Image (spheres, coloured by chain):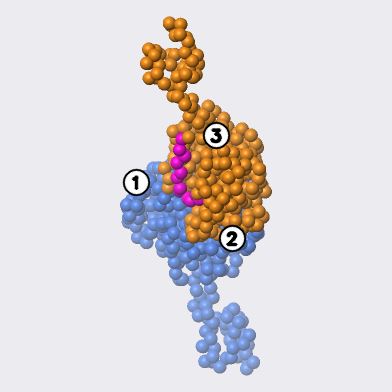
Chain colours: A blue, B orange
Amino acid sequence: MDFVFLGTGAGIPAKARNVSAIALELLEERGAVWLFDCGEATQHQILRTPVKPRRIEKIFITHLHGDHIFGLPGFLSSRSFQGGTEELIIYGPAGIEEFVLTSLRVSGTHVLYPLQFVEVTEGVVFEDETFIVTAMPLDHGIFCLGYRIVEKDRPGVLLVDKLRSEGIKPGPLFKRLKNGEDVQLEDGRILSGKNYLGEPQKGRVITILGDTRPCEAVDILAENADYLVHEATFSEKDVKIAHDYYHSTTVQAAEAASRARVKQLILTHISSRYLADDIIQLRNEAAAVFPETMIAEDLLSVKIPLN
Amino acid sequence: MDFVFLGTGAGIPAKARNVSAIALELLEERGAVWLFDCGEATQHQILRTPVKPRRIEKIFITHLHGDHIFGLPGFLSSRSFQGGTEELIIYGPAGIEEFVLTSLRVSGTHVLYPLQFVEVTEGVVFEDETFIVTAMPLDHGIFCLGYRIVEKDRPGVLLVDKLRSEGIKPGPLFKRLKNGEDVQLEDGRILSGKNYLGEPQKGRVITILGDTRPCEAVDILAENADYLVHEATFSEKDVKIAHDYYHSTTVQAAEAASRARVKQLILTHISSRYLADDIIQLRNEAAAVFPETMIAEDLLSVKIPLN
Ligand SMILES: [Zn+2]
Ligand SMILES: [Zn+2]
């Protein structure tokens, strides 16, 4: 599990930072990549990373501002042009389907893979054996979502050596023990699976927010997360502007991380008004409140370790 | 008058060439820039040039394929965000207005300048005292236009020294003479303006085509042009593929330039299958037929001299 930050700027593209997109690579977990937002030229940024467009199976859109969605039509077209045939599902606010389908229709684009849309309001967005994704609305003037991605705990590995040492031979019952079932041996002994399993592997929690002012939903979505990706469009010095434009400051993001007791905070969506030298200052403002803070930059890759 | 080639690739963006866009700078002629097509990340390319988005007063779209239009919503939004207030007019095939207005509406974008659309089919697209632009449909499977931009001849300069040497003093009649009128002096003499004007400045003709197979409209649009910008998606070796996908080869473009007796041919819209080494070969193929051929590359600027 890795982040690849594709665009970490706010509002309009600048030389140093493109508009918003984050890839969450789940290659070991599900052989797939999830994309969060898709600002213009996200596909251009992907060209500079190891991310394979055909591997992207889900795109989660936080809100419909252009700097978060205008890269979708081009990305979807190119994914098809390059031979992608696997289904792609786009999750996001009402309106995203109209934007994408109008763009594809007007441009005469027929993608060669199944393309689905799931309109998101609040609650469970997606769930299977490995992950559950929930969403809540934030405070951004227009409808804007934060996503909480919870990896389900994985059962412990089967303690094969222990079974062997007790004279139990490999066979179909190993699979039932691995599932935690009780099984009866031919000699009458009853074995309880849970005695032959290692520690369960605790799943990771990743919170990726759209643009927002500080609000209660942030705290709920981020609670005890391993990683919180939070916008920090402005410096604390510009707290008034941040409020007026429905954004957060560095310090407001750090305060949320602290309240939610996350392990690591990553700040993104940085206004292009801040130049390279200012970025250190932005980090310092946040780190004074929440030390485990880093500021994302375009093409930064962050490995998310197992718990 | 200068070209700035913003994107010279075909179909999908690649590291070496972005998708289609060409700026025609008319700074001396009208203090403005015209854009031809606007593929995704055109605004990103503009960041790397001296072109000012607010100076772009007209955008001419050749056709609605995504690699020619998906940069429009982002460009239009950023032009407003950066304070552009001057009117912008978009010329192009039916459908471009729906695409742009849907994108702006869904994304909640309200541009702060008047935005107009002119649906183009064929004939005169725009005319004022300095330029006339005409369009004709090409052969590209979907409706696709070529544009012929004709700079009107400029009257010669008023020969002030000659007037002075004949004892005629500056005054309101100078303006009338400059307009080529006949004027009567107080002493009864009648002067004919045309005798006091230098050589007229011959206007330039620029032909910028959308994607196309060879067709008669190319020859008409390009006739005697000073510059012909022609797609050359494929090498002559791939002439069959070019035909199947409604594109032209290097040699087909050169043959059109030769038939139309243009002064200079610029090839663009080059498939990403051709690597740096192949480009020399592509140029040689075309130059064998029409020596005054160059191949555009991203961010190339070409000065268009006065006649
Ligand atoms: Zn944003
Ligand atoms: Zn094209």
Mark 2 near ligand 2 (CB under 8 Å)?
no
User: What whole-number distance in Å separates the C-alpha atoms at marks 1 and 3?
Assistant: 53 Å
Q: Position of residue B223 (x, y in %)?
A: 59, 39
Which residue: 48% across, 35% down? B307
Q: Quadrant of residue A193?
A: bottom right
Residue sitting farthest toward the top: B187
Write down the residue under mark 2: A82
Q: From where the camera sits, is residue B34 visible?
A: yes
Badge 2 and badge 3 in a common chain? no
Of tags 2 and 3, which is closer to the observer? 3
Asked if B170 appears above or below B72 in the picture, the reply is above
Of tags 2 and 1, which is closer to the observer? 2
The magenta span reads: B295-306
Which residue: 56% across, 50% down? B289
Q: Amino acid at mark 2?
A: Gln
Q: Are marks 2 and 3 in contact (CB under 8 Å)?
A: no
Find out whether residue B303 is within the magenta segment.
yes
Q: Which one is in front, A190 or A231?
A: A231
Q: Residues within 10 Å of mark 3 (few under 14, many from 20)?
A: some
Write down the residue under mark 1: A237
Q: Are marks 2 and 1 in contact (CB under 8 Å)?
A: no
Asked if B164 appears above or below B13 in the picture, the reply is above
Question: What secondary structure is found at the residue carrying circle 1?
Answer: helix
Q: Amino acid at mark 3?
A: Val
In the picture, measured across the screen, residue B45 lies left or right of residue B260, that is left
Q: Main secondary structure of the magenta part?
A: loop
Q: Quadrant of residue A179?
A: bottom right
User: What whole-number distance in Å separates the C-alpha atoms at marks 2 and 3?
Assistant: 39 Å
Q: Position of residue B219 (x, y in %)?
A: 62, 42
Question: What secondary structure is found at the residue carrying circle 3?
Answer: strand
Asked if B113 appears above or below A174 in the picture, the reply is above
Q: Position of residue B214 (x, y in %)?
A: 64, 48
